[in-house]
Amino acid sequence: SSEWVESDGVARGCGWLCVSARFHHDFLGRCCHLHHDKTLFKITTMRTLLSAIPPSSSPSSLARSWVLACDGMVVYDIQDESGRTNEPRPFPFRKTCDPSKYGSILSKASGKQCVIYKSVVEHSVGSFDQWLGECTATHNHHALNLVGAATSKVGHPGPTLADAAERVVSHPGCDFGCVTIAERHIKKGNEHQNIMRKQKLGAQWFISQAVYDGAATCKLITDYADLCKAEGVKPRKIVLTFAPCGRKKTLTFIKWLGVKVPEDVEERIFSVDKEKTTCTDESVAILNEILDMILKATSTTGVPIGINVESVSIVREEIDGAHSLFQSLQRKTLDWHSYQQGKSLRWAIRWIQVDAEGGAASEGGELAAPAAAPLQLGLAL
């Protein structure tokens, strides 16, 4: 679930945070351009993603994050979500352009694959089918993240999540994932069963809500791993989302989105010695510690982990914090993966220049196939 906020400089994900406008990289030394890569969610690798939100018009700045070596981008589908909570929305809602259309702009500019969020409840069944056709055929996306209704209290004319999943699965060359929320697991104790239910519908990966409560996430992953073992199935990849915060107004918005922020974490963020550090930098340090804890606590579960970094602010300091967070979490996951694989693993990040049309040049300068080439994610994460 996502939200766009314009006033007071706050947004659910920063539209230009995730774009690498000229460069494309090979992850774990595989020489695989993302528009050809069939392993964006491969189960044996830790993938690193950056989130984006579609603006109400075409993006005006695409180069802000071109130094970040992300494997792909997550593009949110912006919804009102007014029925999800009785709490007043901290900032006004603003409808933005279609995430599939915006994702095609990002893919052409960066040469990277996008994972497109899609709320399935806003359309009739027929209009969902039309959107799906345009998403794959016109905008050339092949990885969707399906989101159901924010609340069961409000009726919707479109397909159910199960109906939408069936349509995506039957659509040639298209895979999908779903959302997972650790807070639901703490409240109801059945989120691991929700993951398994969606996995049986065909979900190939799960992207979490922003993580600030590491213990809740560890509990969810452990219970999910136990359920997979009991049912004799291979666990799907869980991509953990992290979002830095340096202002109380930003944190209020994060909480409104349903993210649990423990009191001690909030106190630590806003009680820093501002002559030595910033609240944003402290949140980055905390989120690094949380990922450390999750990786160690779940290392024997067999559940593959990825990371996704989003900015919920257009304030410069918090955007810079998202960049710093991405780099530190990426280093951490690479180091951890190397440690888990033992001394036999050797990895490297290689950079390849991408031309203005989205094609990727080889190291010798020869232009590779354009970014519009279809990506088949396959069955394995």
Image: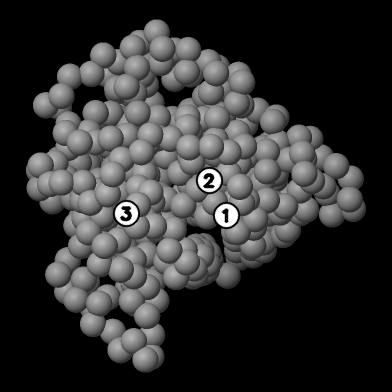
Dividing the picture into quadrants, the one containing residue 198 is top left
For this rendering, which residue is in front, 67 or 374?
67
Q: Is residue 187 above or below residue 214?
A: above
Q: Residue furthest bottom?
A: 275
Residue 292 lies, in percent from the top left, at 36, 69
> Picture coordinates of residue 89 (x, y %)?
21, 46
Q: Position of residue 234 (x, y in %)?
A: 37, 39
Identify residue for label 1: 70
Q: Which residue is mark 2?
A: 73
Mark with earlier residue (3, 1) = 1
Q: Label 2 neighbourhood size at 10 Å, few (<14), some (14-19), many (20+)? A: many
Q: Earlier in the sequence, mark 3 or mark 2?
A: 2
Task: Return the residue nearer the eye: 230 or 149.
Answer: 149
Q: Dots 3 and 2: beta carbons under 8 Å? A: no
Give the quadrant of the N terminus.
top left
Does residue 245 appear left or right of residue 45 in this picture?
left
Query: From this viewpoint, is residue 65 visible?
Result: yes
Which residue is disc 3 drawn over? 210
Look at the numbered disc 1 and give the secondary structure of its residue.
Answer: loop
Circles 1 and 2: CB distance less than 8 Å?
Answer: yes
